[in-house]
């Protein structure tokens, strides 16, 4: 009788541990990003709301935007080691963690927000993306369209000739570094927090950047010129430390994943609208946006395509991921 009673108590205790009742120990989830007031920051805020609704009291979330927990390399290191539970960033900045992150940067792969959405949010691909980097100790709990990549310059650059010799901050992806080299620029991968001092001191002449960052950090007070190259779209992800994730109850893990997907859905249109707002804010503050002449745009895209093909051929695992994404985009365009 006593044995039966103790067994029944153990079963009840186990069931209770999977609930979101007040007896459950609260877990802390620090979510870091280098940016502020952009789609990454918006996704984080939406995620926190969604998670609180799904798992009340289970997780204490703390938001750290604008590189409050360190530079991008330090935040990357933090989420890998577990000192930071989650990190939201463009895929370009974590290609050193896994080269397959480069697949999202291939010039010409994504031409619009719709292309990004069609690939990332294909149900089968989104499930694949979630677990794609588990071997590196990371799980993708958020994936989103960020913005087009533009070239900000201190001096007015209207043509590709004007770009030659400029010291350009790039993301840390070879598929951003090599295209700038092809244009004759000098690419310098740097954390976002170090860019403005370098621009002001002459250490940099410009930067490749998602357009909304320029207005969120008021770059129009530093320089005035954007050359809109139309060669790639920034994709951002939120990665969570897998060891921390596995320490959560099954119910909490399910809530985290559901909250991430719900935040993606809500952030998508917000991100598109934010790009339009950013361009308007830029010009309202005296900024100039220039398009390449048609012939130069075509020549640049052809050169980038050839370069990308060579880079992909040398990395079969990146090429395989790119081909999957490319097919999803092409299938969506054909509908």
Image: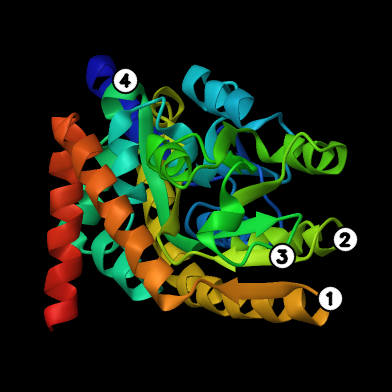
Circle 1 packing at 10 Å, graded few (<14), some (14-19), many (20+), is some
Marks 3 and 2 in Cβ contact (< 8 Å) = no
Say which residue label 3 marks: 225
Q: Quadrant of residue 126?
A: bottom left
C-alpha span from label 3 to label 4: 72 Å
Say which residue label 1 marks: 285
For discs 1 and 4, the disc positioned in front in the rendered view: 1
- Residue 286, percent from left and from top: 83, 76
C-alpha span from label 1 to label 3: 11 Å
- State whether residue 285 is above or below residue 307: below
Q: Is residue 325 left or right of residue 170?
A: left
C-alpha span from label 1 to label 4: 71 Å
Q: Is residue 304 left or right of residue 44?
A: left
Q: Earlier in the sequence, mark 2 or mark 4?
A: 4
- Residue 150, percent from left and from top: 56, 61
For discs 3 and 4, the disc positioned in front in the rendered view: 3
User: Where is the C terminus found, in terms of image quarters?
Assistant: bottom left
For discs 3 and 2, the disc positioned in front in the rendered view: 3
Say which residue label 2 marks: 221
Taking the spot 41% from the left edge, 43% from the top edge, the residue there is 182
C-alpha span from label 2 to label 4: 69 Å
Marks 2 and 1 in Cβ contact (< 8 Å) = yes
As rendered, which of 88 and 168 lies closer to the eye? 168
Say which residue label 4 marks: 6
Q: Earlier in the sequence, mark 2 or mark 1?
A: 2
């Amino acid at each position: 009788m006593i044995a039966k009673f103790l067994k029944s108590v153990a079963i009840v205790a186990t069931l209770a541990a999977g609930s979101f009742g007040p007896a459950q120990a609260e877990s802390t989830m620090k979510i870091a990003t280098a940016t502020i007031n952009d789609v990454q920051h918006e996704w984080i805020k939406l995620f926190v709301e969604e998670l609180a609704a799904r798992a009340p009291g289970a997780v204490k979330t703390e938001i750290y935007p604008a590189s409050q927990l360190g530079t991008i390399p330090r935040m990357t290191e933090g989420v890998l080691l577990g000192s930071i539970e989650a990190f939201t960033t463009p895929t370009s900045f974590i290609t050193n963690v896994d080269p397959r992150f480069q697949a999202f940067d291939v010039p010409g792969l994504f031409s619009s927000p719709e292309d990004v959405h069609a690939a990332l949010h294909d149900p089968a691909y989104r499930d694949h993306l979630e677990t794609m980097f588990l071997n590196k100790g990371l799980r993708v709990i958020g994936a989103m369209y960020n913005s087009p990549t533009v070239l900000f310059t201190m001096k007015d650059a209207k043509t590709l000739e004007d770009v030659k010799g400029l010291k350009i901050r790039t993301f840390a992806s070879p598929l951003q570094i090599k295209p700038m080299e092809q244009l004759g620029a000098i690419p310098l991968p740097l954390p976002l927090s170090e860019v403005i001092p370098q621009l002001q001191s002459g250490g940099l002449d410009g930067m490749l950047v998602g357009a909304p960052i320029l207005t969120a950090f008021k770059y129009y007070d530093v320089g005035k010129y954007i050359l809109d190259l139309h060669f790639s779209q920034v994709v951002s992800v939120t990665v969570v430390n897998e060891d921390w994730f596995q320490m959560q109850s099954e119910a909490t893990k399910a809530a985290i994943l559901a909250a991430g997907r719900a935040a993606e859905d809500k952030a998508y249109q917000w991100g598109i609208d934010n790009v339009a707002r950013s361009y308007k804010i830029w010009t309202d503050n005296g900024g100039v946006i220039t398009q390449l002449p048609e012939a130069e745009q075509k020549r640049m895209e052809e050169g980038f395509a050839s370069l990308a093909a060579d880079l992909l051929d040398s990395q079969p695992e990146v090429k395989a991921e790119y081909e999957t994404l490319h097919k999803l985009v092409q299938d969506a365009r054909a509908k």
